[in-house]
Image (tube, rainbow, N blue to C red):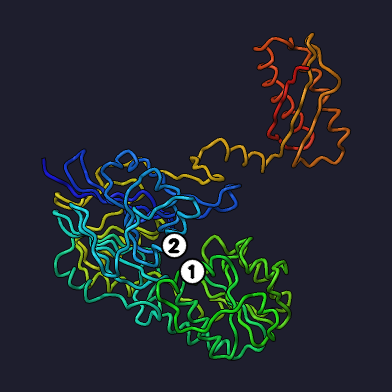
Amino acid sequence: MKKELLFCPLGGSGEIGMNMNLFGYGEPGNHKWIMVDIGVTFADDTIPGIDLIYPDPGFIVERKQNLLGIILTHAHEDHIGAIAHLWPKLKCQIYATPFTAVLIREKFREKHIDITNDLKIVELNGKVNLDPFEVEYITLTHSILEPNGLKIQTPAGIVLHTGDWKVDPNPLIGDEINAKRLKEIGNEGVLAMICDSTNVFSEGRSGSELDVRKNMLNIMNRLKKKIIITSFASNVARMESAFYCAEKTGRKISLVGRSMHRIYKAARQCGYLNNTIEPIDTRDAKNIARENIVYLCTGSQGEPMGAMMRISNYTHPDVFIEKGDAVIFSSKIIPGNEKKLYKLHNQLVKDGIEVISEESEFIHVSGHPNREDLKDMYDWVKPKCVIPVHGEHRHMIEHINFAKKMQVPHPVQVENGDIVKLAPCEYPEVYDKAPNGRLYLDGSISVEENSKSIKDRKNLGANGYLEITILITPKGNVHKSPIITFKGLPVYQADEFVFALEEEIEKTLKTFKLGNKSQENNLIDALKIALRRITKEKIGKKPFTNINLIKI
């Protein structure tokens, strides 16, 4: 039987976030696998009580004895965020460059898992041999330290997995994109390239961190009062720019927010940010004049518990903002966050605070490739096949069209769960489907999308809660009036509402014999139906209803 090379995305294809990709090689039914990235996405208000969502790894969990390792391209949450939640189901080795490894260790420490023996640190541009795969890390540029593409060498040929990247001629921190090595790999012959699609609609180039720094300095030179910069904590180059501009404008800088401190500490641990001024504690910063301080804080997307939101609500214990101050949103407005961000902007402006964002000034560049960046990568790598990932369907379909314009012979359109045979075949194509889906982190438990806990919470959130407790004597009679409690119902005439419920309960009770177990179960169902109906008639809601029959 001929050995085959497969690619299968379980997350990140058809969405931006939650990246999880599998490469398999071997005889049909007996493949060896590697996983590239294991990320999360963040839930919105439509899923109450849920923060994190990650891919369902069931397909590879069933084959975990053949999983050789998890290869991490970089440390963004959409690439590493699920690792401490899902690794216990996989129990394999993890490979990461030093900065990513520091953040991984911390995730496992929070879960009280000792990962020391299974976390392998790979030097920049280093190699990992996981027979039949030889994986080479290629330094790229992105909006975080140590972003890597992966050259995956197999007996069937070479696959280049780009991870997240852009072409930044002046990344400020870390090396420039290793174009020389990418060209060499292109000359060796690339069977397939798995490529980032995020900015495929954007013309031109993504832009450089150096240009952002220059403009940020110009802006800060004209501002006379307190300055608050909010950005993604993971963007260490932007963090260094904030330190640089603070020093050049004669200001002290203070970090606000747990993530900002965590990333700063990790960067310093790995030898970065050594030539910047020392940040000062937020408690000490209160004693510094407004015109001499810059705060760099989390919450650039208007997160309810982010430092920026707490500052704007005047609930932060150490950072106070006042009329005449300025807030610089040095980040992209992520689609879906517009509503809460504009609400935050409006609140600040209303309070007399100047708001500077990407809409008004050049203070942010993306970490993903625009069309000119993509052209560079295609020219260097010259792949026979391109598989767009890291995008919604509209991004990936546009990327397929772009690949055709770039004369790629065999672009392949995929979605989560598609299994693509890369070799041996006349041309790569989707030939099978793996089970796939999403898992929600509900508290500390992984649940499926259609779990009862989430359905119940949605019902509670939309319709409120009604609870009836009926006390039953040993002789099977009702003791006194039923106990009625309700939450989240628009009831203004409580006595009238309760009386209507009591009347309905009494009427329903007459048709059942208490003391008979099967009759009591039927009674509970009948009461739920009757009370939801009467509540709908009275107030227009059909609440989540709970009936307790208690024998006394």
- Residue 62 visible from this viewpoint: yes
Task: Identify the residue shown where x is 38% and y is 74%.
Answer: 203
Q: Residue at x 67, y 40 (%)?
A: 460
- Would you identify the image quadrant in which residue 288 lies? bottom right
Left or right: 80, with 540 as reference point: left
Report crowding for label 2: few under 14, some 14 to 19, many 20 or more residues within 10 A (C-alpha).
Answer: some
Q: Amino acid at mark 2?
A: Leu
* Image quadrant assignment for residue 323: bottom right
* Residue placed under numbered mark 2 in the picture: 103
Cα distance between the residues tagged 2 and 1: 8 Å
Can you give x and y, in whole percent of width and height, for residue 112 in the image?
48, 50
> What kind of residue is marked 1?
Ile
- Position of 99 relative to 20 (above/below): below
> Would residue 378 be found to the left or right of residue 335 on screen?
left
Displayed quadrant of residue 139:
bottom left
Question: Given contact means CB atoms under 8 Å apart, are the residues at marks 2 and 1 in contact?
Answer: yes
Read off the residue under disc 1. 263
Whether residue 192 can be seen here: no
- For label 1, the crowd category at 10 Å Cα-Cα, with few meaning under 14, some 14 to 19 and many 20 or more, is some
